Structures are given as C-alpha cells and as structure tokens.
Image: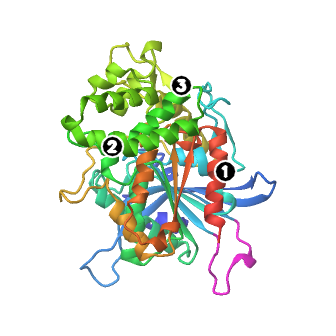
Amino acid sequence: MPDADYEAYDRRTQPAADPIADPNLTARLTPASARKTLVTRDGASLDYTVTAGYFDLTEENIGGPLAEDATVKARVFLTQYVADAADNNRTANGDDPRPVIFLFNGGPGSSSAWLHLGLFGPRIVDVVKEDGVTPKRPPYALRDNPDSPLAFADLVVVDAISTGYSRVATGEAADQYHDSDVDVEAMTNIIRLWITRNRRWNSPLYIAGESYGVLRGSAVTDRLAIRYGIYLSGLILISSPITLGRMDFAPGTILGHHAFLPTYAAVAHYHGFNADRTLDDVLAEAERFADTDYLWALNQGHRLPDDKRREIIATYSRLTGLDEAYVERADLKVTPSQFRAELLRSQGRVVGRNDGRFTGWDRNGLGETPAGDPADQVLRGAFAAGINSYLRQEVGYENDLSYEIDTTRVKPWNVPQNHRRNPFHVLPELSKALRTNRTLRVLYQVGHYDLCTPFWGMVSDVALLEIPPELRGNVRISEFDSGHMIYVDDASRIRESADIRRFVTEE
C-alpha cells in the first residue's frame, strides 16, 4: 500500500483537511507499518512487514475519455503481512514465488478480525482457558502464533466494505455494496488491484473464506477466472454449506433437518449423552441415519406408517438427547434454535449457536428458542479488544472511527431478484470454477459442534459438485471436533494450521 495511493485519493476526493475540524483525518488516511519477526513452532525465524491502512477500490469510468483516471469508490481497510524478500527468492523474470492468501470472514456484516486474530495472524488473542470453553477475564492478552500461515505465505486481511474500518468514499451511497452480487464484484476487484499494484500476478494465489466468506469466496474464485483470467492455486473454505437447502427450515423443505442431525448428535455427546460411546461411533450412526431412514421419513410426511414413525422418533431421541415426546411434537423436525433451547433445559442452560460446546443462560427456562448465543457472548469482547489494541499498539495505526467487528449496517442485504439464483447457493459457481481452472484445489474445513452451519451439509454439498471424476480429487474435506470458528481452542487451531500448511505447500 504505497503512500502515493493515499495522496492521490486525498487529492481526488477530499477537500483540504482542516486539522482543527478533523484532527484524525491525516491519521486515518495514512497507513502504518511495522517490521516484525515470526518465530515458528519448529524454531525458524521469518522477518516480515505488517501494514495496516486504507486501500483505494477504484472503478473504471466506462465511456469516458481514453485512460481517464478511475474513480475511487471505497476505502477498503487491509492488514497485510509480507515477508522480507531476498533477491534469490525472485524468479528469472522477477516474479515472487511466495504464495499470497487473501482472507475474509462473512456475515454479511462481519469484519475479518476473527480469522485474523484467531488463526492466520502472527499474533492471536487469548480467549478461553485450556478446556476450550471457559472464558478468560479482561484485559485480553495478545500472544505470538507460532503456527501462523505467514510462515509460508504472505497474508492480506480484507475487511468487507462497511465492516472493520472499511467505508465508501465521500459522495458514494453508503449502501451500494450491501448487495451479494456487488459485494462479489468488489472483492474480485480488490484482489485484482492488490496483485496489480504489488506485482504479484504470477505468485501462487489463495483465498480463505469463513462462513458467508465461503459463499463469497466461491463466487469470487469463479469471477476472477472468468472475468480476469486470474486462476487461483487454491481455495480454503471454512464453515459453511454452499447450497441454500442446508440452511432452510421453511415449510415443505427437509434438507436443513437432514444436514443438522449429525451436529445435534455431536453436541449431545459432548454434553454427556451417549457417554458410553465414542464420538466417532455416534457420528457414524447419525450420518447413516440422516442419509437413510431419517431422510426417507421426512420425505414420507403423512405417508409414514405409525410403527416406522415410532422407530424413527426413538432413534432420533437416542442420538440427539431430546425427549421422544418433544421430537413427536416437533413432527421430527427440530430446528437448530429449538435444539439449543431444549437440550439442557433441565439444567437451566442453553447451548451455543457458533459452537455447541459453550453454554449460557436465557432470561427464563420457558423460551422455545434462545435470545442470544453463549459462544458469541464469550468470544466477541476478546476479539473486539484484541483487534483495536493490536492495530494501535503493535502496528501503530490510528483511527477514531468505530472498528465494526460485526455490524448491522449492511442490512438489508440485497439479493438477486431472479428466482433461479440465490447468493446462498453457490454450488454452480464453485463447480464452474473447478471445471474452468482444472488445477484449482479446494480445502474444506468443518466443525462437528457448529450449530450455525452444519458439517454434514458441507460434506453432502461436496458430493453434489458438478465436476467430472478426474477433478474430484482436487477437493478435500477436513473435519474437526470444534465449532463454527474451528480455531477457538488451541488443539483445533494447531491442527487446522497444519492442515492449511500441507494444502498450500504440497506439490
């Protein structure tokens, strides 16, 4: 992010700064950099530069004078980590062979602080104690991350527009990027501009997206290849199905119920149900049951014979820890929110949405669905404090704006009106990206305790990709005994990082 970019932006779009009226303007528009050293788990050292600040998202003025300056549409907040380059790291034609990973979270409305300070960054925030669920008390400590992917790849952390410090430019409509298609186009252009300005077109390029970032990342991968001929080396998808049906519980839909049942079984096992069996054993039965008798029973509806219905209810109850009478009243279709409220009702607790291992309390024990998410309640404060203190105290970036860690400003999130398209269904885009760039590899990481996006739905989605047998080996799934944010506990984070290292560095 060269300073010239910011000076040009200031000349084009900003009135002369009045230091009395806005003493923070100069600090906001000036990126901050710091040179640091990463010490990896094997003891190796890597010198790098971290730079945090605004990156101009420009848009070509189609139909204007030839080579007219592009218009700055938004100031996108990036935190980038680039290893110090040695001359012998360059190829004969000057290309940098070091991989680059662009990473973002989702929401829509979520900043990328979660992946940044939870998994990828060289510094991470301490959130929970060794048991993986008990919260630590503030103030929250930042600590070195010896497993950071920075050891083998440069990192570009992107906060989507309206999240983090990212904002539209002066005079632009505040909600113009609160649209699934426009968001994809913007993220595609951010990546194109970054590799152009930093001369990294011929570096191995990767995207890592979490949650809605899985949907965004899949669509961006397709768009990069089709629109600009930018072929990624790999796509890292973390915690989200790629088809709408896995998240849909509307009347007449059944795939959401099918997808979540193994997650219910995993969470129930964690909380002491079926304690005489291993988790692997419980999951194997739950997955078979979900794909066979349960899916068949859901499709039967009122045609289901009474004796078979009683059998299905009994198995469902045994696997999920829910009372048979409750499953009967739910007509075999318990939603994730209902499950979270019901599983530990007798203990006066509800379980987490982002991670079913976490528990908390509702305002009383009568609610059908919990009012909050105990997992989010534990994690949010640590990540908010972590990102604000890290940017200021360790990188030196100053900004009085609110760092929107997870904002509602993006609502309503606009979706295409064409009834045959939905931004929460990107299986066609991911399939096309794999068929177009036949060397593209995909790593799909999923958590067994994720009550936000079901791991079995993701496994099922991969099986439905519209790709030939020759390409199926390009997609790999890794399962973790963790939640939506797999990296919350150290054991899962270390394994997840090693998984990403293998994926990026393997030939």
Dot 2: element: helix
Label 1 vs label 2, nearer the camera: 2
| Quadrant (top left/top right/bottom left/bottom right) for the N terminus | bottom right
In this rendering, position of residue 172 left or right of residue 147: left
Magenta extent: 84-98
Check disc 2: other Cα within 10 Å, few if <14, some if 14-19, many if 20+.
some
In this rendering, position of residue 80 left or right of residue 466: right
| Quadrant (top left/top right/bottom left/bottom right) for the C terminus | bottom right
Q: Main secondary structure of the magenta part?
A: loop
Q: Depth check: 408 or 474 in front?
A: 474
Q: Are marks 3 and 1 in contact (CB under 8 Å)?
A: no
Residue 94 shown in magenta? yes
Dot 1: element: loop
Point out the tag, 2 or 3, that comes first from the N-terminus.
3
Residue 87 shown in magenta? yes
Q: Amino acid at mark 1?
A: Pro
Q: Which residue is mark 1?
A: 122
- Identify the mark at residue 295; answer none if there is no mark: 2
**Quarter holding residue 137:** top right
Any part of residue 217 in sight: yes
Separation of residues labelled 2 and 3 (CA atoms): 25 Å
Any part of residue 332 in sight: no
Q: What residue lies at 49% left-to-right and 48% top-to-bottom?
A: 112
Position of residue 81 measured from the top left corner of the image (x, y, whole percent):
62, 59
Q: What residue lies at 53% left-to-right and 29% top-to-bottom?
A: 269
- Identify the mark at residue 271; answer none if there is no mark: 3
Q: What residue lies at 65% left-to-right and 59% top-to-bottom?
A: 501
Q: Depth check: 38 or 294 in front?
A: 294
- Is the residue 250 above or below the residue 205 in the image? above
